[in-house]
Image (cartoon, rainbow, N blue to C red):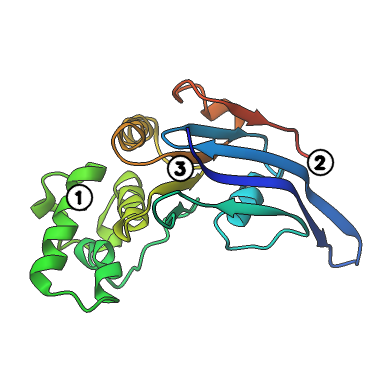
């Protein structure tokens, strides 16, 4: 299978307020292929979020390189943060159609796009959710909106940072099923999880390392 995303020799170093060096990542190399569900497992402070942010292009490594490519087209990456990164002043429809707002699409096209994403991420029936604001949603529903936003620009690769954290047991189970559905139908995924939260994941390569702290 073709590699969608790869990193080679990634290291990330920070400086503390006292000026001391703190090594978050040290010589990490991995690749994710078309259709693969790859999981990075580690305890808090082990560098999972840092690695995902570097792979997404949000942060830059201190050393090493990343490669995102496809033989046919540019790869678009969707990133789902630990917190629900949604616009609190926009409705569910407004959040899900934000990418189309930037393209000045018609209201009809934006509505249809939002309905499609609602169905994809399990916010059904869509009419129940489209006019609601984030503060009117449960934690699991808000996380689904965040996933829909990551997909809204046509992402072909999804990165999840603790996708099911801060959710109750039932919401977590439901979201896990949605993520598995997305993996099977939509995109390759790379996710970061704490050791006690990855047992539900499908068979895949699981990278694991211990916290330096």
Q: Camera-side residue: 4 or 112?
A: 4
Asked if disc 3 and disc 1 are in contact, CB closer than 8 Å, the reply is no
- Up/down of 79 relative to 45, above or below: below
Residue 62 location (% of width, % of height)? 78, 60
Pick out the residue farthest to the bottom.
Answer: 104
What secondary structure is marked by label 1? helix
Kindly identify the residue that appears in the image at 25 percent across and 75 percent down: 101
Q: Is 138 on the left-hand or right-hand side of 206?
A: left
Q: Camera-side residue: 125 or 201?
A: 201
Asked if disc 2 and disc 1 are in contact, CB closer than 8 Å, the reply is no
- Up/down of 73 relative to 210, above or below: below
Give the Cα distance between marks 2 and 3: 23 Å
Residue 24 location (% of width, % of height)? 77, 50
Kindly identify the residue that appears in the image at 35 percent across and 50 percent down: 147
Residue 115 location (% of width, % of height)? 14, 54
Mark 1, Cα crowd under 10 Å, few <14 / some 14-19 / many 20+, is many
Quickly name the residue at label 3.
163
Quickly name the residue at label 1.
118
Quickly name the residue at label 2.
212
Q: Quadrant of residue 132?
A: bottom left
Return the disc, 2 or 1, that comes first in the chain's sequence.
1
Residue 110 location (% of width, % of height)? 16, 67
């Amino acid at each position: 299978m073709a590699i969608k995303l790869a990193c080679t020799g990634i290291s990330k170093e920070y400086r503390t307020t006292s000026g001391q060096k703190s090594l978050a990542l040290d010589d990490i190399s991995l690749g994710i292929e078309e259709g693969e569900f790859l999981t990075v497992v580690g305890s808090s402070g082990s560098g999972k979020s840092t690695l995902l942010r570097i792979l997404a292009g949000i942060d830059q490594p201190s050393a090493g390189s990343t490669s995102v490519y496809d033989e046919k087209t540019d790869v678009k990456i969707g990133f789902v943060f630990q917190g629900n990164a949604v616009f609190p002043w926009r409705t569910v429809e407004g959040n899900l159609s934000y990418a189309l707002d930037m393209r000045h699409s018609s209201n009809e096209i934006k509505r249809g796009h939002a309905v499609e994403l609602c169905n994809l991420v399990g916010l059904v029936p869509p009419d129940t959710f489209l006019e609601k604001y984030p503060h009117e949603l449960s934690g699991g529903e808000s996380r689904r909106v965040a996933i829909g936003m990551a997909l809204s620009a046509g992402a072909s690769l999804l990165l999840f940072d603790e996708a099911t954290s801060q959710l109750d047991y039932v919401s977590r189970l439901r979201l896990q099923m949605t993520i598995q559905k997305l993996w099977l139908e939509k995109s390759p995924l790379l996710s970061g999880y704490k050791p006690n939260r990855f047992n539900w994941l499908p068979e895949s390569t699981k990278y694991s390392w211990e916290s330096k702290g």
